[in-house]
Amino acid sequence: MSSVFLTEVDFTRVMALQPDPLLRAELERAIVVPRDSIPPQTVTMNSVVRYRDTHADVAREIQIVVPDDADAAQGKVSVLAPVGAALLGLESGQTIDWTFPGGETRTLHVEAVEQRPAA
């Protein structure tokens, strides 16, 4: 299994949201580093990421945000939503199998991190 990287700020912020057990487990296995040490092309909070849902063969570009900033019409997806939770910490080129509500498992592939907040 590939490593998942999170910034210290993102780890603290998302844990404070009291995520569901699946996301919490993913956060707890992540390698937590200072923001300026995060590998390039890693999905962080407020990143704009292009990914493909291989199950539905659909590509989307979204921004991962805190729940209060989520707005589907603007492509802003909450980190607590299944897609946001699955993609956080992945690097461009990585793929993850993630269980969605209802028990369906989908494979998500990060095609590119288009924009990431400044370090």
Image: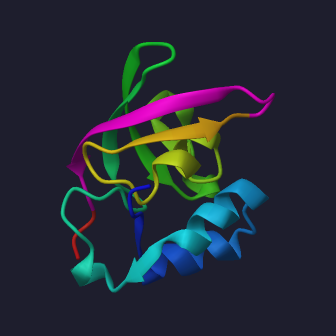
Is 106 above or below relative to 16? above
How many dots with numbers?
Answer: 0
Q: On the rendered structure, is 46 left or right of 11?
A: left
The answer to whether any part of residue 20 appears in the image is: no
Q: Is residue 21 left or right of residue 89?
A: right
Decide whether the magenta segment is chiefly helix, strand or loop.
Answer: strand
Rendering colour mode: rainbow
Which residue occupies 63% across, 56% down? 68
Task: Give residue 2's position: percent from left, percent from top.
Answer: 38, 57
Which quarter shows the N terminus?
bottom left
Residue 17 in percent (x, y) is at: 70, 68
Please state if 110 lies on the left or on the right of 114 as rendered: right
Residue 67 painted magenta? no
Locate residue 3, reporting x and y percent.
39, 64
Farthest-out residue, right: 102
Q: Is residue 21 visible?
A: yes
Tell whether position 112 is magenta.
yes
Q: Which portion, as a residue range, is magenta?
A: 101-116
**Which residue shows up at 72% across the image and 62% down it?**
19
